[in-house]
């Protein structure tokens, strides 16, 4: 049985690694040759819009999924004519447009920050006047890891933000003075079975996730996050893994965005849960029974960004789990991650803080 994956980055790579023990095969489609997933599995190389490649992928696979939410919806629609596709196209379309995403949250009673569409300089001025400062101007499409956005803190920031981003549809959002960030990861199978992972607390720097700790003990916050996740899964009759990121402000959740795919904040589940998010995504899209999402300890996941520390330095701690994605170094690029497990949250947090300082200082 073969699963097709559009996009061949580290998320696809880890899906394949999770699926091989189940006796599954994988076929990737990516515009770039030499991807990190192609080191493990066959790959079709060419444009995501290439009809011949899309038809070949559909013909050779029992189901097709994604490792990146910005794949063209029209391409997935073509595949879906003959082969099951997950996640649902409606979820993919909503996640690709920040305005649609915010509107969806609002319609389901999921709290989010004030926002307005911006299609002109005059729209931006009106939005700033209505919502106030500080605020964040973002591209409606294609932004990730802090790309495609500008923070406006004073009136004089309007012109520079418009000059850098104003050539495309935008959204202006109220800045949320959050206390911390969390995410919730859920999975729903083709059979309607649902499983949720515990709450993650996330630390971003320069728009990129640096550290995730799970499970994060915040019962009221987690209960709300689980309610909102179930609403989204039901709304879409969702299939696969879905992630929602929230700001936490005075004990209340403010939805930031959703990702209709396996997620960086769930990498800890490989060692830290009975069944990883990657294996459960594979199970879900094939209609197999979902695996147990219970934790095996208190986990911390740290991204390795821009430049890889030495393996010797990392593995000198025999309790660390290293995942090297096989990618060439580049500033801001996610090259791998490490996961640590502890018996208590306090010990996890202490070790994670120490390791984060070392990684950032490149002392390993």
Image (tube, helix red, strand yellow):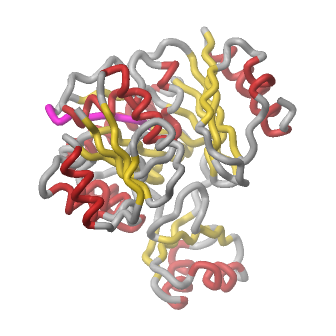
In which quadrant of the rendered view does residue 19 lie?
top left
The image shows residue 257, relative to residue 276, as above or below, that is below
Position of 269 compared to 283: left or right? right
Position of 189 compared to 113: left or right? left
Asked whether 93 falls inside the magenta stretch, the response is no
Q: Residue at x 85, y 38 (%)?
A: 361
Position of 364 compared to 168: left or right? right
Q: Position of residue 342 (x, y in %)?
A: 62, 12
Choose between 252 and 213: the one closer to the eye.
213
Q: Residue at x 52, y 37 (%)?
A: 265
Q: Residue furthest top?
A: 343
Choose between 9 and 285: the one closer to the eye.
9
Residue 102 visible, this angle: no
In which quadrant of the rendered view does residue 22 lie?
top left
Q: Position of residue 275 (x, y in %)?
A: 39, 20
Residue span colored magenta: 184-191
Chief secondary structure of the magenta portion: strand
Position of 151 compared to 131: left or right? right
Choose between 302 and 8: the one closer to the eye.
8
């Amino acid at each position: 049985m073969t699963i097709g994956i559009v996009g061949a980055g580290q998320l696809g790579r880890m899906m394949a690694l999770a699926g091989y023990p189940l006796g599954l095969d994988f076929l990737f489609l990516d515009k770039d040759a030499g991807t990190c997933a192609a080191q493990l599995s066959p790959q079709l190389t060419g444009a995501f819009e290439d009809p011949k490649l899309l038809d070949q992928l559909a013909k050779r696979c029992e189901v097709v999924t994604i490792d990146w939410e910005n794949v063209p919806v029209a391409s997935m629609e073509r595949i879906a004519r003959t082969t099951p596709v997950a996640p649902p196209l409606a979820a993919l379309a909503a996640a690709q447009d920040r305005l649609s995403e915010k509107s969806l949250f609002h319609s389901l009673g999921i709290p989010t920050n004030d926002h307005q569409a911006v299609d002109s300089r005059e729209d931006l001025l009106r939005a700033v006047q209505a919502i106030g400062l500080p605020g964040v101007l973002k591209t409606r499409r294609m932004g990730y890891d802090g790309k495609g956005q500008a923070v406006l803190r004073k009136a004089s920031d309007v012109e520079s933000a418009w000059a850098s981003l104003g050539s495309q549809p935008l959204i202006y959002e109220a800045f949320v003075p959050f206390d911390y960030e969390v995410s919730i990861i859920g999975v729903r199978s083709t059979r309607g079975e649902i499983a949720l992972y515990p709450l993650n607390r996330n630390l971003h720097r320069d728009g990129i996730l640096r550290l995730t700790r799970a499970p994060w003990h915040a019962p009221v916050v987690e209960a709300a996050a689980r309610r909102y996740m179930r609403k989204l899964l039901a709304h879409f009759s969702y299939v696969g893994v879905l992630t929602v990121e929230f700001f936490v402000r005075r004990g209340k959740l403010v939805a930031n965005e959703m990702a209709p795919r396996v997620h960086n904040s769930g990498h800890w589940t490989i060692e830290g849960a009975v069944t990883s998010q990657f294996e459960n995504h594979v199970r879900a899209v094939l209609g197999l029974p979902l695996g147990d999402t219970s934790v095996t300890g208190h986990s911390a996941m740290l991204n390795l960004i821009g430049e890889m520390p030495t393996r010797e330095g990392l593995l000198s701690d025999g309790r660390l789990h290293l995942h090297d994605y096989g990618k060439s170094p580049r500033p801001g690029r996610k090259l791998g991650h490490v996961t640590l497990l502890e018996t208590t949250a306090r010990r996890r947090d202490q070790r994670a803080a120490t390791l984060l300082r070392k990684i950032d200082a490149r002392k390993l």
